[in-house]
Image: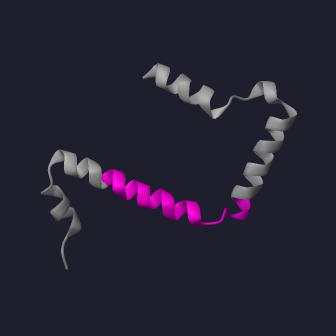
Amino acid sequence: MIDLLEEAKKLSLAEKIQLVEDLWDAIAEEAAQRPLTEAQERVLKARMEARRQRPDQSRSWEEVRLDVEGRL
């Protein structure tokens, strides 16, 4: 069997970065196909309800993203 890590180490830096990006995309795609667990669904519903009840105490993803990017 081929040692994948040893083979990956032979790649150029650009190829390693591309490999990591491709792997991450594959992981994200697979994870997106899995249903939420009951615990995850409860947390999601609770957070959605909290947002509905107190919209002034939360921020959109766009606001959070811009804040984080501004700190980098």
Residue nearer the viewer, 18 or 67: 18
Question: Which image quarter: residue 37?
Answer: bottom right
Residue 42 among those drawn in magenta: no
Q: Picture coordinates of residue 47 (x, y %)? A: 76, 43
In the image, what residue occupies the spot 84% across and 37% down? 52
In the image, what residue occupies the spot 45% across and 60% down? 27
User: Which quadrant would the C terminus be assigned to in this image?
Assistant: top left
Left or right of 39 on screen, residue 16: left
Residue lying furthest left in this view?
A: 10
For residue 19, above or below residue 52 = below
Residue nearer the viewer, 40 or 20: 20
Q: Picture coordinates of residue 1 (x, y %)? A: 19, 80
Question: Which image quarter: residue 66?
Answer: top right
Q: Picture coordinates of residue 7 (x, y %)? A: 16, 64
Residue lying furthest top in this view?
A: 70
Question: Which image quarter: residue 19?
Answer: bottom left
Q: Picture coordinates of residue 44 (x, y %)? A: 73, 50
Give the total of numbered labels: 0
Residue nearer the viewer, 40 or 10: 10
Magenta stretch bounds: 20-39
For residue 1, above or below residue 24 = below
Residue lying furthest right in this view?
A: 53
